[in-house]
Every structure is written in structure tokens, then in C-alpha cells.
């Protein structure tokens, strides 16, 4: 049992320590506890938009990636109720876009797909929205397929915070919200993005892909064929697959 | 310039109102009837902002457009109190233009807007940003004629644009005369600590609906460290059915500005902003005149009332059609020339608000009340009201009653008393606090207004026995889906799923399964959304399912399941293309 001077929170009955300034997500990760998430990535500013990491803190709903850990928090994470909620949120992300896993090059490396499997999602459940979204193939090495975009803004933040550029942004409102490129023409080809940028590699789905590297890793040997999304410390592995480095 | 949604904005000198992106875009929209791509590029260079940030702002706010609107751009309110979509359809037919489209000659476009705050004098519309109230068939016909003859808006009859106060019942705030400067004089004689103490003792809580203690908010902000402190008056009164801030800004602007200045005095701010909803743009000339008079009287500017250490200025930022900007952190984002996306909280604005600095955001009515409390003291205020809700509340009453308008009551007043006063009979239901509030039926009319029972930001919409209440609920569902900012998944997708689910039931295609689904989704959206919009958007549906289940059940098909997809409807486009509408071209 901890003494009262130690900072600790309890997740699903397990008491774990935290340091001042950590969010619930930070503390959980440090203790190898998996909280499903899509818009969060260590090193980038927490966003709190996908809501997959929603937990119940002392009975109240909160995003674990943005809520600071505080002594004595009783947190429900891996419960049947939250699994159902997260499954529904994931289904929402599927039906609002155009996700055709079997024909998508990202399949097997896609975090959205992996999260869906993790949550035992078997169908989209809700009626499809079938939005009309634009593909941008103007860049010689990178393409942008907005059909698959889930508005997580990882690319927006990576470009700004890590690459020191400002290549991506979100425009529109509500269901019209969509990813745009910060260039005169609005085309990726006229932006200053390069394939080495984190923004070009961080996309958790198949919206931003490097050209001319399709199917280098065969299906069956891809990231989530070999790993579970709930595995601790998987980020570097996911990113490496994005770069299509051989194992 | 950091365009990221979040509290880590670099402190800098605030944007002057004449340089504000929203104001530039308004001027461009007025000149070209849309925002041309070239104008966006030019603005990006001139304001040193990323092109994508300006595009983001243009696409976020309802009153900016990327393709040309008509030289007369007419917007009908969709509000159940100040809207009349049948009239819109009539005008569309009369002028030969389809809803949402611009006439081929560029003369006119007709579309919808969320509640424009004219609920006591509707039906109402806006033409090129100016409000026309009390629409009738005759007035509509005359508007059509003015459009056809291309008469400049300035030459349209002035009485069409007249907006009335319609104050029906005075109370503590509306009924007490206010001498300009008296609150500041009282404040300076007491000093900031004593004034703060008085505000706290009065029990004044935020009048926007959330009800946070005003004294506590000011205290937190006063104690917060920063390079500068700011006062923001939230006049983005967007909750359908609410119009009381319009009256306060029309006839009590001195109280409001004096309340802002007082707040500046207490928290140590030198700058205040009034964030005004675009629908109230017609108030601007008078508001500027009041500000100028206050400047001349030494109540604004440097050394206020001769106090060397007390300087305070007020600027006005006008929004551009986005309900979400009534949420305080979205409002701050909008003031920072960005899309109005709610921030992650904590930190709260009192420690990290406008430009990352300690900021108080208060409702118009809260600030007006603070000014009166400074003059008359806390006891004057808190001897009225109920246990946990001190003072009075100004209500905007609209809908099915004989005298819609402004009513001020002490908290604790019963719903029935209000209904009696405004002449409402055979009432089926009331939406208290607007669509984000509570829907109640007759068996709850003995309930009382107050934070401990029925909280309200001021909207009070009455629906008589003749109303199709399910159509009202559906109207609200459409409203929230339209106004969702799109930041978080549950609200972005969920409000659209709820809207579609309700449409299916309203159109007679719903089953018990759809009811159950709607309840499940409404609960998820309410509990898991990021901000107050998503957390309250399902309220009308949940309230109606609980209190008026028959409304839904009467429309249900008696089968287990019917798909959303309707084969015959989906052939409509094919029929149109082939110019066929005979029986053979239909499936059922």
C-alpha cells in the first residue's frame, strides 16, 4: 500500500504512481496499461478529440489524454461499458468516412483498423454517410486520400510541432470538417512537406501515404499481424511500418 | 502565428478591432458577396497568417461563403419562434430561386440561418446582415418587389428594420434606473477588494446558464499571474429563443460596459472586449456611440475618474454565425482569429484565456447585474431570489403566448406564474433554457426557475396544444448537427446520426429499434462529448423520449426493422433526369 505522500491513481482497481504534470494517459502508459486512443501520440501536444480514450474518473467522463492525473482518482478503463462506448465511437469514425479495408494499402498497418479489432468491432453498425471527399495526388512522393481521414490532427501537430512547418490544417465545421493543405493552391505538391517529415509518416490511417512503396510488406506480416495494438511501447514499431522499413 | 487550438498561445499585443480577421472577411463578403480565393491570399500576406488558417475561418462561420451569394442575400431564421420556413418557400417560389442557391443573374439568394434572436417579433429574416422583423404575406410581397426593382437596401422602408425591446415585466435590473458612472464611483470609493467582496456576497452567478459564481471567477482571475488580464463580455447570444442580451445592449449598454470596467478594476485588466453575435450587428452604431460618450466622460481610457493607476478600454469584435462561439473557450479562439473550437479545460480562461492570459468571460446580464450591485450593494440583490439562486433572471419569452417579450423575475418563480403572466393557455410543453435546456410538460409547471431546479440562460419557448412537438424536437436536432464544430467524434458524428434517426421516425419509417438506438446514441453523445454543445445537444431527444414517448410511438412502423435506405426515394434523381414521373417509374 502506498503512503499518502506518494502520488497515485487507481485504474480498474490497480494503484499506479504518477508524476506531477502527467495526464492519466501518461501515467497509464508508464504502467503499461493500454487505454485505446487514436489522436494521441507521446511527444505531440494532447488533443482530446477522438474521445476513444474516454474513461470514467470518479464516475465522470473524461479524456485520459488531456486530464491531468490527480491523487486519489478512481478510474474505470477496461470495462464492458467503456468497451461498448469506444466501439461505437470507432464505428462512427468508420461510417463518416469511406474506409474500404480490403483495398487499402494501409491494411494491417492501420491503427484505426487495429483498434476496431481490439474492440471486437465486426461492422460499421450505423448507416454509412458516404461523403464526397477529394484525393490530392499532386505531390511527387506523397498522396493525400481524404476518404480515409479521421480528423485526428496528428499530421497537423507533427508538422507544426516537430517539423517546424505548417503544412496541414482543418477547415469547415461539423461533418464538413476536413483536412486542408497550407499552400496557395491548396495542393500538397505546392507545400513544403517532404517524405522525411513526421507529418508525412504519422498518419494512423491511410490518408497520408508515401508513393511508390505499395505492398512492400506482405499482408500477414504487417504491424498488427504481428503485434496487438494494446502492446506497450508500440509507437516506434507503428511508425517504422509507416516508413516501410524491412524488419 | 500559432493557429493551434490550445492554451499555449504566445502572449502578444492583442489584435485591434479594425485589423481583426473576422472584420476583414465581413468587408470582403459585403463587397464581393463571397470571399474570393485571391482575397484570402492577399489577407494572408497582409495579416501574416497562414492561408490555411484564413480558409479554416472562412469555412467555419456560417456568414462567409466561398461562392457568390446574391446581391440580396436573404436568410430566414430556422428557429421555432422567429422562423417561418413556409414563408421562405413562398419567397423562393415568388423570386424563382431555389433554397441555398444564387439566382443565375446574381440578384438574390435565399437560405436559412440558426435563430437570429427576434423570437418576440418574428417571423424574421436577415438581408445582407440586416434584420427584418414581423414578416407577413404583404411584407414578403413588398420585399420581393424591392428585390426585383433592385432598390438599394438603404431605401427600403425603415420600419421594416425596426427592432423592438418589448419589455413586459421589469424587475430588479430592468426596473432600477442607472446613473452612468455611479458604479465606478462606488467601486473606487470602496477599492477593488471590498468591491470583489460585495460581488461575492451578493451571490451573483453567471447568467449564461452555467451559473459559476461571479465573485469567485473574478477572484481566481485577479489572483492569476500574467502579462496582462482581459475582460470579455459574451454577447454571442445564440441559444435559440434567447434575446434578452439584445435588450440589455439596446437600452442598458452603460450598465454592461460599466460592469466590464468594474471587472477590469477588480482583476487588474486594461482591456475589455465585447464579442457580439453577427445577428446583432445593427446595434453597432449605438454601441460605439455609448463607448465614445463614456470615453468623453472619463469612464473609459486612461486615468478613469482621475485614478492614475486605472486605465481601461473596450473594443467590439463581431462574430460571423457560429453557435459554438457562445462557449467561452471557443469564443476566445474566435477572438484569436481562429475557428471557434472549444479548448481543452483545464486550464480555464481565468488562468489561461485570451492570448494565454488570465481572462474573465462573463455574460452580458451578469456584467449589467454587477454594475447595479456595485451601486446598491449585495443585500439589494440577494434579498430577492431563491435559496441557491440569488437575485433575478431576465427571461426571453416566445412561442405560443399572447405577449412574447422580456420578463424579469426573482429566481424561484414557478413556471405556471410565468405562463399566466405572458398569456399562455393550453400549453403542451415548454423548452426552458433553449434546446440545450430542459423540455417539460404540464405536470411540471409547478417547478421553479433557479439553479437548484430549472436552470436557464433565459430562453423560454412555449409550445401550445396545436404544435407538432416532434417537429420541434427534430428542428433542434437539425440545429445541433448544423452547429456542431466537428472537433470531437461523439458530437460531430453523433449529432448527425441523431438528426438522421429522428428524421426517419418523423417521416414514418422508424421502428422500435430506431427508438432504442436513438436513446443509446443520445446517451453516448451527452456523456462523452468534449464540450457543452455535445453534452446538451441530445437533451431535447432524451427529454421527449422520457416525457412524451407517445410522440414517437405514434409514428413508428409496427415491424422490427426498416432500413434507412428507401429504394423509391433513391430513384428520384433518375426520374428527374429522364423526365418521368409515371407509375412505372416508381417502385411502390
Image (cartoon, rainbow, N blue to C red):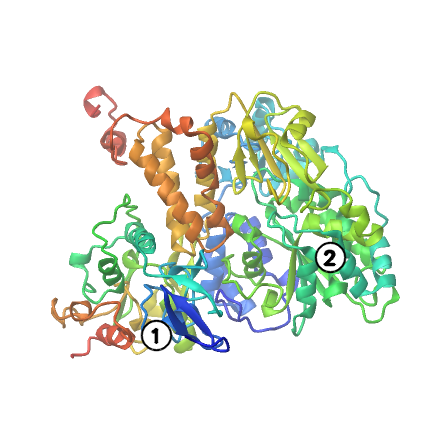
Above or below, B282 against A209 in this view is above
Depth check, mark 2 against mark 1: the one in front is: 1
The residue under the point 27% across, 69% down is A142
Q: Tag count in the figure?
A: 2
Mark 1 neighbour density, 10 Å: few (under 14) some (14–19) many (20 or more):
some
The residue under the point 52% across, 56% down is B340
Instruction: Identify the secondary structure beneath mark 2.
Output: helix
Query: Residue B173 lies in what quarter of the image?
Result: top right
Does residue B421 appear in the picture of this structure?
yes
Point out residue B126 in the picture as x, y percentages from the top left corner: 58, 38
Point out residue A14 in the picture as x, y percentages from the top left corner: 36, 68
Mark 2 falls within which chain? Answer: B
> Which one is nearer the viewer's eye here, B30 or B90?
B90
Query: Residue B511 lies in what quarter of the image?
Result: top left
Mark 1 falls within which chain? Answer: A
Q: Identify the disc placed on residue A31.
A: 1
Mark 2 neighbour density, 10 Å: few (under 14) some (14–19) many (20 or more):
some
For the C terminus of chain A, the quadrant is bottom left
Above or below, A70 against B443 in this view is below
The residue under the point 77% across, 40% down is B174
The residue under the point 13% across, 71% down is A221
Residue beneath disc 2: B200
Structural distance between the alpha carbons of marks 2 and 1: 44 Å
- Left or right, B489 with respect to B165, comes to left
Above or below, B99 against A209 in this view is above
Q: Identify the disc placed on residue B478.
A: none
Query: Which residue is situated farthest in the front direction here?
Result: A1
Amino acid at each position: 500500500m502506498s503512503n499518502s505522500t506518494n502520488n497515485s491513481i487507481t485504474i480498474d482497481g490497480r494503484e499506479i504512481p504518477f508524476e506531477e504534470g502527467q495526464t492519466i494517459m501518461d501515467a497509464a502508459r508508464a504502467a503499461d496499461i493500454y487505454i485505446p486512443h487514436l489522436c494521441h501520440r507521446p511527444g505531440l501536444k494532447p488533443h482530446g478529440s477522438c474521445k476513444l480514450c474516454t474513461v470514467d474518473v470518479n464516475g465522470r467522463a473524461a479524456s485520459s489524454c488531456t486530464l491531468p492525473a490527480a491523487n486519489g482518482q478512481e478510474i474505470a478503463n477496461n470495462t464492458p461499458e467503456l468497451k461498448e462506448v469506444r466501439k461505437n465511437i470507432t464505428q462512427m469514425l468508420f461510417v463518416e468516412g469511406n474506409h474500404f479495408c480490403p483495398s487499402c494499402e494501409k491494411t494491417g498497418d492501420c491503427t484505426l483498423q487495429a483498434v476496431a479489432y481490439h474492440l471486437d468491432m465486426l461492422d460499421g453498425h450505423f448507416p454509412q454517410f458516404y461523403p464526397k471527399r477529394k484525393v490530392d495526388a499532386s505531390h511527387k512522393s506523397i498522396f493525400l486520400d481524404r476518404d480515409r481521414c479521421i480528423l485526428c490532427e496528428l499530421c497537423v501537430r507533427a508538422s507544426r510541432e516537430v517539423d517546424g512547418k505548417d503544412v496541414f490544417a482543418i477547415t469547415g465545421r461539423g461533418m464538413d470538417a476536413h483536412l486542408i493543405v497550407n499552400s496557395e493552391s491548396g495542393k500538397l505538391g505546392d507545400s513544403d512537406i517532404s517524405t522525411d517529415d513526421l507529418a508525412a509518416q504519422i498518419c494512423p490511417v491511410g490518408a497520408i501515404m508515401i508513393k511508390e512503396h505499395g505492398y512492400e510488406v506482405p499482408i500477414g506480416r504487417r504491424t498488427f499481424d504481428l503485434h496487438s495494438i494494446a502492446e506497450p511501447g508500440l509507437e516506434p514499431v507503428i511508425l517504422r511500418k509507416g516508413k516501410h522499413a524491412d524488419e | 502565428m500559432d493557429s493551434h487550438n490550445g492554451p499555449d498561445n504566445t502572449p502578444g499585443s492583442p489584435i485591434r478591432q479594425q485589423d481583426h480577421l473576422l472584420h476583414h472577411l465581413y468587408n470582403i463578403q459585403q463587397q464581393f458577396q463571397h470571399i474570393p480565393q485571391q482575397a484570402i491570399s492577399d489577407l494572408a500576406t497582409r495579416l501574416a497568417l497562414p492561408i490555411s488558417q484564413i480558409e479554416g475561418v472562412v469555412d467555419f462561420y456560417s456568414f462567409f461563403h466561398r461562392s457568390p451569394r446574391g446581391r440580396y442575400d436573404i436568410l430566414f431564421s430556422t428557429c421555432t419562434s422567429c422562423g417561418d420556413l413556409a414563408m421562405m418557400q413562398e419567397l423562393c417560389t415568388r423570386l424563382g430561386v431555389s433554397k441555398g442557391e444564387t439566382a443565375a443573374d446574381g440578384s438574390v439568394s435565399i437560405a436559412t440561418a440558426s435563430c437570429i434572436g427576434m423570437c418576440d417579433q418574428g417571423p424574421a429574416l436577415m438581408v445582407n446582415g440586416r434584420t427584418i422583423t414581423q414578416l407577413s404575406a404583404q411584407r414578403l410581397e413588398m420585399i420581393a418587389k424591392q428585390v426585383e426593382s433592385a432598390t438599394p437596401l438603404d431605401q427600403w422602408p425603415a420600419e421594416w428594420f425596426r427592432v423592438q425591446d418589448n419589455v413586459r415585466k421589469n424587475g430588479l435590473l430592468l426596473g432600477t434606473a442607472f446613473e452612468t458612472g455611479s458604479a465606478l464611483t462606488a467601486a473606487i470609493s470602496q477599492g477593488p477588494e471590498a468591491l470583489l467582496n460585495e460581488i461575492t456576497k451578493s451571490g451573483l452567478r453567471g447568467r449564461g446558464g452555467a451559473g459559476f459564481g461571479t465573485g469567485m471567477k473574478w477572484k481566481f482571475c485577479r489572483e492569476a499571474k500574467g502579462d496582462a488580464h482581459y475582460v470579455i463580455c459574451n454577447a454571442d447570444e445564440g441559444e435559440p429563443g434567447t434575446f434578452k442580451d439584445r435588450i440589455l445592449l439596446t437600452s442598458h449598454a452603460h450598465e454592461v460596459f460599466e460592469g466590464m470596467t468594474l471587472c477590469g478594476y477588480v482583476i487588474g485588466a486594461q482591456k475589455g472586449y465585447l464579442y457580439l453575435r453577427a445577428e446583432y450587428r445593427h446595434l453597432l452604431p449605438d454601441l460605439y456611440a455609448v463607448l465614445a460618450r463614456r470615453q468623453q466622460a472619463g469612464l473609459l481610457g486612461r486615468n478613469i475618474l482621475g485614478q492614475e493607476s486605472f486605465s481601461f478600454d473596450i473594443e467590439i469584435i463581431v462574430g460571423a454565425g457560429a453557435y459554438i462561439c457562445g462557449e467561452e473557450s471557443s469564443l476566445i479562439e474566435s477572438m484569436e482569429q481562429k475557428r471557434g473550437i472549444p479548448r481543452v479545460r483545464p486550464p480555464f480562461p481565468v488562468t489561461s484565456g485570451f492570448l494565454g492570459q488570465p481572462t474573465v468571460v462573463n455574460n452580458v446580464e451578469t456584467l449589467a447585474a454587477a454594475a447595479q450591485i456595485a451601486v446598491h450593494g449585495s443585500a439589494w440583490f440577494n434579498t430577492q431570489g431563491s435559496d441557491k439562486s440569488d437575485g433575478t433572471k431576465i427571461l426571453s419569452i416566445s412561442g405560443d403566448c399572447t405577449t412574447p417579450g422580456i420578463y424579469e423575475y426573482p429566481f424561484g418563480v414557478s413556471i405556471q406564474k410565468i405562463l399566466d403572466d405572458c398569456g399562455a393557455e393550453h400549453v403542451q410543453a415548454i423548452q426552458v433554457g433553449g434546446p440545450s435546456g430542459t423540455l417539460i410538460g404540464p405536470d411540471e409547471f409547478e417547478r421553479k426557475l433557479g439553479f437548484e431546479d430549472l436552470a436557464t440562460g433565459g430562453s423560454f419557448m412555449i409550445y401550445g396544444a396545436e404544435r407538432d412537438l416532434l417537429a420541434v424536437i427534430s428542428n433542434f436536432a437539425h440545429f445541433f448537427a448544423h452547429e456542431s464544430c466537428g472537433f470531437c467524434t461523439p458530437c460531430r458524428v453523433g449529432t448527425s446520426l441523431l438528426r438522421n434517426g429522428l428524421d426517419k421516425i418523423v417521416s414514418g419509417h422508424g421502428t422500435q429499434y430506431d427508438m432504442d438506438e436513438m436513446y443509446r446514441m443520445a446517451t453516448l453523445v451527452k456523456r462523452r462529448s468534449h464540450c457543452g454543445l455535445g453534452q446538451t445537444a441530445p437533451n431535447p431527444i432524451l427529454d421527449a423520449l422520457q416525457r412524451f414517448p407517445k410522440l414517437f410511438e405514434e409514428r413508428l412502423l409496427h415491424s422490427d426493422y426498416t432500413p434507412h435506405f428507401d429504394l423509391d426515394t433513391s430513384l428520384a434523381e433518375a426520374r428527374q433526369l429522364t423526365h418521368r414521373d409515371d407509375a412505372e417509374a416508381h417502385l411502390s
